[in-house]
Image (cartoon, rainbow, N blue to C red):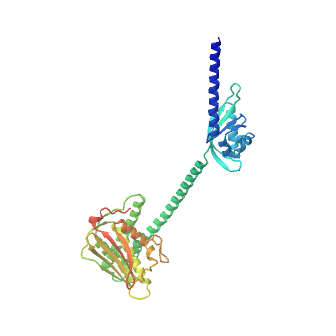
Amino acid sequence: MYADLRHENSDRSKAEEALRASEERWRKLFENSSAGIALCAPDGRFIAANLALQKMLGYTEEELQGLTPLEFTLEEDRAATEARIAESAQGQRRDHRIEKRLLRKDGSVIWTDVSTVFVPASGNTPAFFSAVIVDITDRKRAEEEIKRIRRLEQEMRQASRTEMMGGLTASLAHELNQPLAAVQSNAQAARRLLAAKRPELGEVKAAIDDVIQDNARAAETIRNVRALFQRGEVQMSPVDLRQILCDVERIARADAIFKSVTLRLDLPTALPTVIGNRTQLIEALMNLASNAFDSVCESADGSREVEIRASQPEAGHIHVSVRDSGKGIEPEVMPRLFDAFFTTKPQGMGMGLAIVRSIIENHGGRLWATRNPNRGATFEFDLPVQADAKEAKLI
């Protein structure tokens, strides 16, 4: 009997020792945890709060014991907090987890991740809540910053799209202006010829042919822009650059005569084929010719001369230049000469030279400008011949 009693006492002692060890582990966890831990009565009143929670909220444990969670819950969150406490106290929910804002003693607001478990009464132990509270303010700030950056990126994309659309509109207007102006000029010329007593039908036919060709150029320009919007490639094929230069001279001749400009074309008897888009190359050359005409017309005195020249200084490339005797290019203007929307013309859009550069570079070439030694300027570009140009694409 005494042996049984001793054995029973030994078991009880071991159980008590294990309980004390468990309580000691819990106490160390409670005191040393980096997360805030609190024990609360069913009415929400704090029973105990570890040091991490005290630092998090700015209250001492004694101050917290006189408060409930509602007192440092933001006004707009109180109704939801009351409902959760009531549900847990009534046994409708044993645990819950939520991210919520808490008001610190100093008035600042922090974001927390709160995990709460309701422990019902058991024996001599009354019911209570156990809560683990983690400060996630830094994470929330990072999330808000990411959202802000994304909103800013969206706004920037929208602004970029608006700017791009404005640029494309200006580009399209600029590119269509030349063929449409040529259509009008040739149509008026045909009408004048027909009004004569003895119309020269050959000249009338030539003017009408020019109208048809200029109309085709305008239509091709529109097709190219549509291809851009549809993410397609502008059609590239072998083209005769010498013939293109002859066509440009023919198109620009009427404008040169009207502006009293002497236009010369200096070409070799033959040039190798290049890979390109005929309409785009004509537009680039017409832009350069038109700018040259404007430059010589703005010059107060001296001859009005523009020369378009082509050569093949080396086997792999064709060199083209448009030289004028105009007012020239100021040194401070040169670095920005090919920038989009930069112009020195009162009524200019600043798209012409930017378009020319884009066309030449997308054909695998290079465009530049120089000041002439005496007067005027020369715009020059190189294009690879067919063997080297197969990889050139317009995008």
Q: Nearer the viewer, residue 202 or 364?
A: 364
* Rendered position, 299 above or below 95: below
Estimate the x, y position of residue 117 in percent, counting from the top left.
Answer: 64, 34
Q: Quadrant of the C terminus?
A: bottom left
For image coordinates 52% across by 60% down, the residue present is 156
* Quadrant of the snapshot with the N terminus: top right
Nearest to the observer: residue 43 or residue 373: 43
Image height of 107 relative to 7, above or below? below
Percent from the top left, x then y, of residue 272? Answer: 25, 70
**How far from the left and from the top, in percent, is residue 362?**
36, 65
Say if residue 164 shows up in the picture: yes
Q: Say whether residue 382 is left or right of residue 165.
A: left
Q: Is residue 47 left or right of residue 366?
A: right
Q: Is residue 92 visible?
A: no
Q: Is residue 254 above or below residue 382?
A: below
Q: Who's the residue at 39% across and 74% down the image?
A: 287
- Residue 177's quadrant in the figure? bottom left
The one nearer the camera, 333 or 233, is 333
